[in-house]
Image (cartoon, grey):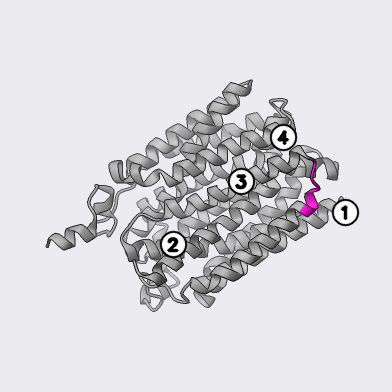
Amino acid sequence: MDLATRKRRLALFAFFFVPGISMASWVTRTPSIRDSLGVSIAEMGSILFGLSMGSMIGILAAGAFVDRFGTKTVMAAGLWFIVAAMIGVAAGEGLSSALLVALGLASFGFGMGISEIAINMDGADLERLTGTHLLHSLHGFFSLGTVCGALIGTGLNLVSFPVAWHMIAIAVFCGALIIYFIGSIPSVLTSFPSNHSHDRNPDVPSSLWKEPTVLAIGFIVLAMALAEGSANDWLPLLMVDDYGFSATSGSVVYLGFATAMTVGRFGGGIVLRRFGRSATLGASAIVASIGITTIILGTGVLSASVAVILWGLGASLGFPVALSAAADTGPNGAQRVKLVAVAGYVAFLVGPPLLGLVGEVSGLRNAMYIVLALVAAASFVAPAIRPRSGSPLKDISQGHSPRKTAAKL
């Protein structure tokens, strides 16, 4: 791997880290933010709807933005919207303004919607270019960001540090990362040529959704992204309201989930090389289902601890492995990644606020049955994920490196 490729990979690591640490920073402070605003669960769900609105606009616009401006410009713009979001949340909490917090979360949703799709496309491009499984490690840095954000948030909860200054500090840190690393991202994708006639064909997206394999991958991405997003948004409050934990203890439980996600993603390469994508996705969905079931039926510290570890490990590989699989299901790989990524981010960013509305009526614990049903269904869909003939990653999932095979020839 040459120097430019290593720098590009490091930059993508950093750009996955930014939304992770940002999201965990405000998620771990949601009990404090809610108390500062003086709102109910339903009203908090309405505030999170700002996140949904921003994310939907970002997700729907991401494809056109990437086609027009390229992944580098789109990911940079999206990341700066995330920085602006942290400042907006800080202002809203400091002024006890639910509107400002909602606008801040809308900025976060828009920024994450456009940047994450662009980053995933760039990551899939780099994965194909190097012939190695990479997306699970890149998403590992998102999870590492959530661990760091959860650690910081838990510590600051413990000492009652002002939420507003916490959000501003994270914004400054993330802004510095963007400035330092953005120059390492190429302006044009290399293994997904931008001048492909197929990629410019407006009928390609609609035709791809007719393919059973793409539909199966899209459903798996949606289910597993919802499993991750629902924990990110609601786990601390679920621990406080349904389990009777303190805000600090709720943050510690969320930290356990984020740590399990990180371990699963960084260790996922071993599982993928040994068992392949289909078996890995199926097993991941089963483990996540067991964890979610335990969180729904459990009552104490032990059950919560076991549940979040299983939930985190199970959810860790679903999203990145399914995105990687999408690129290998046929031609127009960039369009395939873009389409299933949209399904994932719809679930990741829009699903949790809707769960809040359900949770107001029936309780957050019962709202998780929706997540459980989708994740359990994903375990039955996983066998449909098979690499196409000639895929550069097919041999890797079977334990053989394409580069080593070429060397033998």
Q: Position of residue 1 (x, y in %)?
A: 34, 66
For disc 4, the marked residue is: 248
Q: Helix or strand or loop: what does disc 4 sit on?
A: helix
- Tell me, for residue 351, which label it has, or none: 3
Q: Quadrant of the C terminus?
A: bottom left
Q: Helix or strand or loop: what does disc 3 sit on?
A: helix
- Which of the marked residues, 2 or 1, is nearer the chain's N terminus? 1
- Which of the marked residues, 4 or 1, is nearer the chain's N terminus? 1
Determine if the magenta segment contains residue 163.
Answer: yes
For disc 1, the marked residue is: 95
Q: For the residue marked with disc 2, what is the amino acid?
A: Gly
* Span of residues in magenta: 160-165
* Up/down of 288 relative to 17, above or below: above
- Determine whether label 2 and label 1 are within 8 Å by CB: no
389 vs 277, left or right, is left
- Which of the marked residues, 4 or 3, is nearer the chain's N terminus? 4
Real-space Cα distance between discs 3 and 2?
A: 25 Å
- Which of the marked residues, 3 or 1, is nearer the chain's N terminus? 1
Residue at (63, 20) in percent of width and height? 299
* Up/down of 373 relative to 4, above or below: above
